[in-house]
Amino acid sequence: MEAGEVNDPLVAPALLQFADLSVQVAAPIEVGNVGHGTRRMIPILGGTCTARDWTAKVLPGGADFQLIVNERMARLEARYVLETDAGDRIYVHNDAVRTAAPEVMARLVRGEPVDPADVYFRCVPRFETSAPSLAWMMERVFLGTGLRRPNDVVMRFFEVM
C-alpha cells in the first residue's frame, strides 16, 4: 500500500473547523529582558467564541504570557476561560508561535496594525471542562491560526480528525 491511500492508517489527518474567537486584550505589561528573551504579559479583557454547536464569551481575567525570543519570533502562552451561553465553563490553554520579518515583529510588539499575510501565527489550544456534553474536547487535538490586531486577537481553531 502506498502512503496516502484511503486505507492507510497513517494518512495525514484532516482538519475540521471548530471555533472562531475574538479576544480583546489590554496594553502589555512589560517585564523586560529575562536572559532568554523579553517577557511580557497581556491581560485578556473579554471576547466572543462561536463554535460548531455553541457560543460563548471570553471571561475577563485571563492573560497571554509572551516571550519575545528574538527579532523574528515570539512564543505565546494564553490561559483564559470561556463561558458558554448554557453556563458551562471551559478552561483554555493555548500555546502559539508567531514569526515575521524583524520590521513586522517590531510593529506587532509596538501594537501597530500589520498585514496578517506577513505573519506566521499558529497555535495548539487545549481545553478542560466539567461539562459532560463538552468533555469530548479534552480527548481531541486542536490546531489554530491567528492574527493580532491592535486591540484584539482573532483565532480559528480546527479539530484534528
Image (cartoon, grey):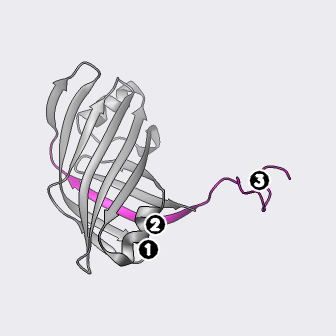
Residue 122, image quadrant = top left
The furthest residue to the top: 35
Using the image, tell me which numbered label, if any, was put on residue 52: 1
| Helix, strand or loop status at disc 1 | loop
6 in magenta: yes
Q: Position of residue 161 (x, y in %)?
A: 58, 62
- Select label 2 or label 3 by which is in front: 3
* Residue at 79% from the left image edge and 49% from the top image edge: 3
The furthest residue to the right: 1
The magenta stretch is 1-27
Q: Are marks 2 and 1 in contact (CB under 8 Å)?
A: yes
* Residue type at numbered disc 1: Arg
In this rendered view, identify the residue nearer to me: 8 or 50. 8
* Residue at 61% from the left image edge and 59% from the top image edge: 14
Residue that badge 2 annotates: 18
* Residue at 24% from the left image edge and 61% from the top image edge: 81
Q: Residues within 10 Å of mark 1 (few under 14, many from 20)?
A: few
Q: Position of residue 120 (x, y in %)?
A: 45, 40
Residue that badge 3 annotates: 4
